[in-house]
Amino acid sequence: MEVLIIIKTIFFDFWDTLFYSSPEQLAKIQKIRIKRLWKAIQQYKPNYTIDQTKYDFTEAWKQIKNIRKQQLIDIGLGGHAKIIITQALGNSFPNNPKALTQITQALMFEIEKYVRPFPMVVETIQTLRDANYNLGIISNTGIDTSASLIRILEVFKIKKLFSTLVFSDNIGYLKPHPIIFKKALKESQTKPCKAVFLGDNLSNDILGAKNMGISTIHFRYNSFQNAFYPL
């Protein structure tokens, strides 16, 4: 006899599942961040140029991506700042508290105006909550921290609809590491067989969730028609 499993909790990825930035908006974010970094680094390196800033930021991001991919560790915003300082100013500066604070602050700014929810996301989240599903977010973060992502949820007035918010910079591990999924299941008091995870990334989202025994739905954001694929 086939056993019917009743879904209790629906988890979502954040970026490119619930929210996105267009290529044009991403370019604006990058431009603002580079300019802020340039001004901060110039205090210690007066002849430092915008082009040097772009190069050092790119090289630092390569190092960060390698750490993320190889170790599945979220080094947090402070870790990002340390690597960027080392790339731009040398090994002596990561231990300079003032420089670290200035670079960290340069990386932070309000990104809400450059972010939009996908069509019908707000309405769908409300409908699911009205249907008494528990809703949660399991998301990797980077330079844009969990605080930034929570602010976006507040701007679009849907934060209150999510009972579980699990972000990698608070956990220290990135999807698809099992720890971040275990944390979400524990906080939501949900068994894996009673959860569904919806995300856009086959490796981080779909494989990570399936390895935990969570059912998955793959969201393909390049097409809003027939965008959802149960896997």
Image: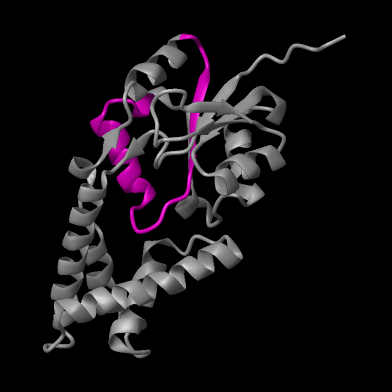
Instruction: Please name the residue shown 63% across and 28% down the image.
Output: 189
Quadrant hosting residue 209: top right
Colour scheme of the rendered structure: one colour
Front residue of this view, candidates 227 and 57: 227
**In which quadrant will I find the N terminus?**
top right
Taking 2 as reference, is 140 above or below it?
A: below
User: Residue 215: horizontal and vertical position, in percent?
Assistant: 65, 29
The reply to whether the magenta stretch includes residue 30 is: no
Q: Position of residue 48 (x, y in %)?
A: 16, 85
Report whether 210 appears left or right of 187.
Answer: right
Q: Residue at x 67, y 14 (%)?
A: 6
Left-right relation of 204 to 128: right
- Relative to 68, say whether 43 is above or below: below
> How far across and how far down the image is residue 142, in percent?
40, 57
**Which residue is found at the position 60% from the left and 65% from the top?**
71
**Residue extending furthest toward the right:** 1
Quadrant (top left, top right, bottom left, bottom right) of the C terminus: top right
x, y percent for residue 8: 61, 19
Q: How many labels does the image show?
A: 0
Viewer can see residue 146: yes
- Residue occupying the point 64% across, 43% down: 207
Can residue 82 be seen at all in this image of the molecule? no
**Closest to the observer: 179 or 201?**
201
Tell me which segment is drawn in magenta.
131-160
Residue 204 vertical placement versus 47 (above, below): above
Q: In screen coordinates, is 226 left or right of 3?
A: left
- Residue 102: image quadrant is bottom left
